Every structure is written in C-alpha cells, then in structure tokens.
Amino acid sequence: MKFDLGILKDFGKNLVIGTATEIVRSWLNEKLKNVSPSDLYDAVINDADLWSLMPENVKQEGLNYKTTYGGLLAKYEDLITTETLLIWIKEDHPDLFSTLINIPEEYGQDAGILWFDKQVRVIKQQLIEGR
C-alpha cells in the first residue's frame, strides 16, 4: 500500500483554511453581538467609517490577531471576502443582514451592501496588511 502525501497536504491545507476562517468568523460574531439593526442602519445612511469609530481596545484586539495569526490570515485573506462575510451575517445575524439589504434606494442602489464592502476592505487593510 502506497501512502499519498498529496492527500495529507490537502487535508492540512483545508484544516488551516478552516482555522483561519473560523478565527475571523468568531471575531466578527463577537463584535456584532451588541450591534442593533438601528445602529447598523444609522451607520450605513451616514456612511460611517467603522475603523475610525472602533474603540481602541477593539482595534488592538484585531491587531493582536494579526500578530498571532498574521501569516495565516494574510496567506488566506482572499477567502475573507465581502460575499463570505455576508453569508456569515445572514446565518449568524439575520436581522443585521436584512438591514443591509433593505436600505432604502434613496441612499443609492444596494447602499447597504456597497457600504459593507467598503468597510470590509478598510478593516482588512488595517488588520491584515497594516495599511
């Protein structure tokens, strides 16, 4: 019987990917647990910059993740997309997801999704790329 190292490598890679994404999902859920649909609605319609509004201790916690898991998160950052985060929010916080997709068109077509995408890009740059 011949052992296939490729299978072991694929398993390890999938395990690492799963770990990286669960770290991000867990952090996101922790930060969203006290956000109300009303808070989110106000942030979207006022085009709030979440990174600048984030308390320093939350920013530092995120940067600590970068220090601890930086190489892992940077290597798989392409897996952490707006689409992926929206799926997680839909599953874990349906009230917030509903708010994002139901922002009135007077604020622009798909205003909630576009705002969220911008926030994801800014926060990823800060936490993963250090920009």
Image (tube, rainbow, N blue to C red):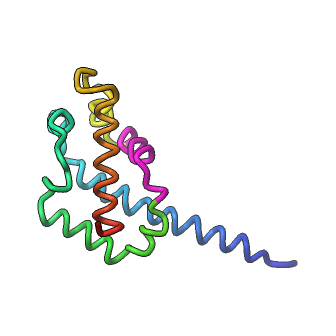
- Is 9 situated left or right of 22 in this image? right
Q: Quadrant of the N terminus?
A: bottom right
User: Where is residue 94 drawn, in percent x and y?
Assistant: 33, 35
Relative to residue 19, is residue 92 depicted above or below?
Answer: above
Relative to residue 55, is residue 47 depicted above or below?
Answer: above
Q: Quadrant of the C terminus?
A: bottom left
Q: Residue at x 73, y 72 (%)?
A: 6
User: Where is residue 122 drawn, in percent x and y?
Assistant: 29, 55
Magenta stretch: residue 121 in it? no
Relative to residue 91, is residue 75 depicted above or below?
Answer: below
Q: Residue at x 28, y 40 (%)?
A: 115
- Is 51 situated left or right of 67 in this image? left
User: Where is residue 55 drawn, in percent x and y?
Assistant: 12, 59
Predominant secondary structure, magenta span: helix
Magenta stretch: residue 82 in it? yes
Q: Magenta segment, which residues?
A: 78-91
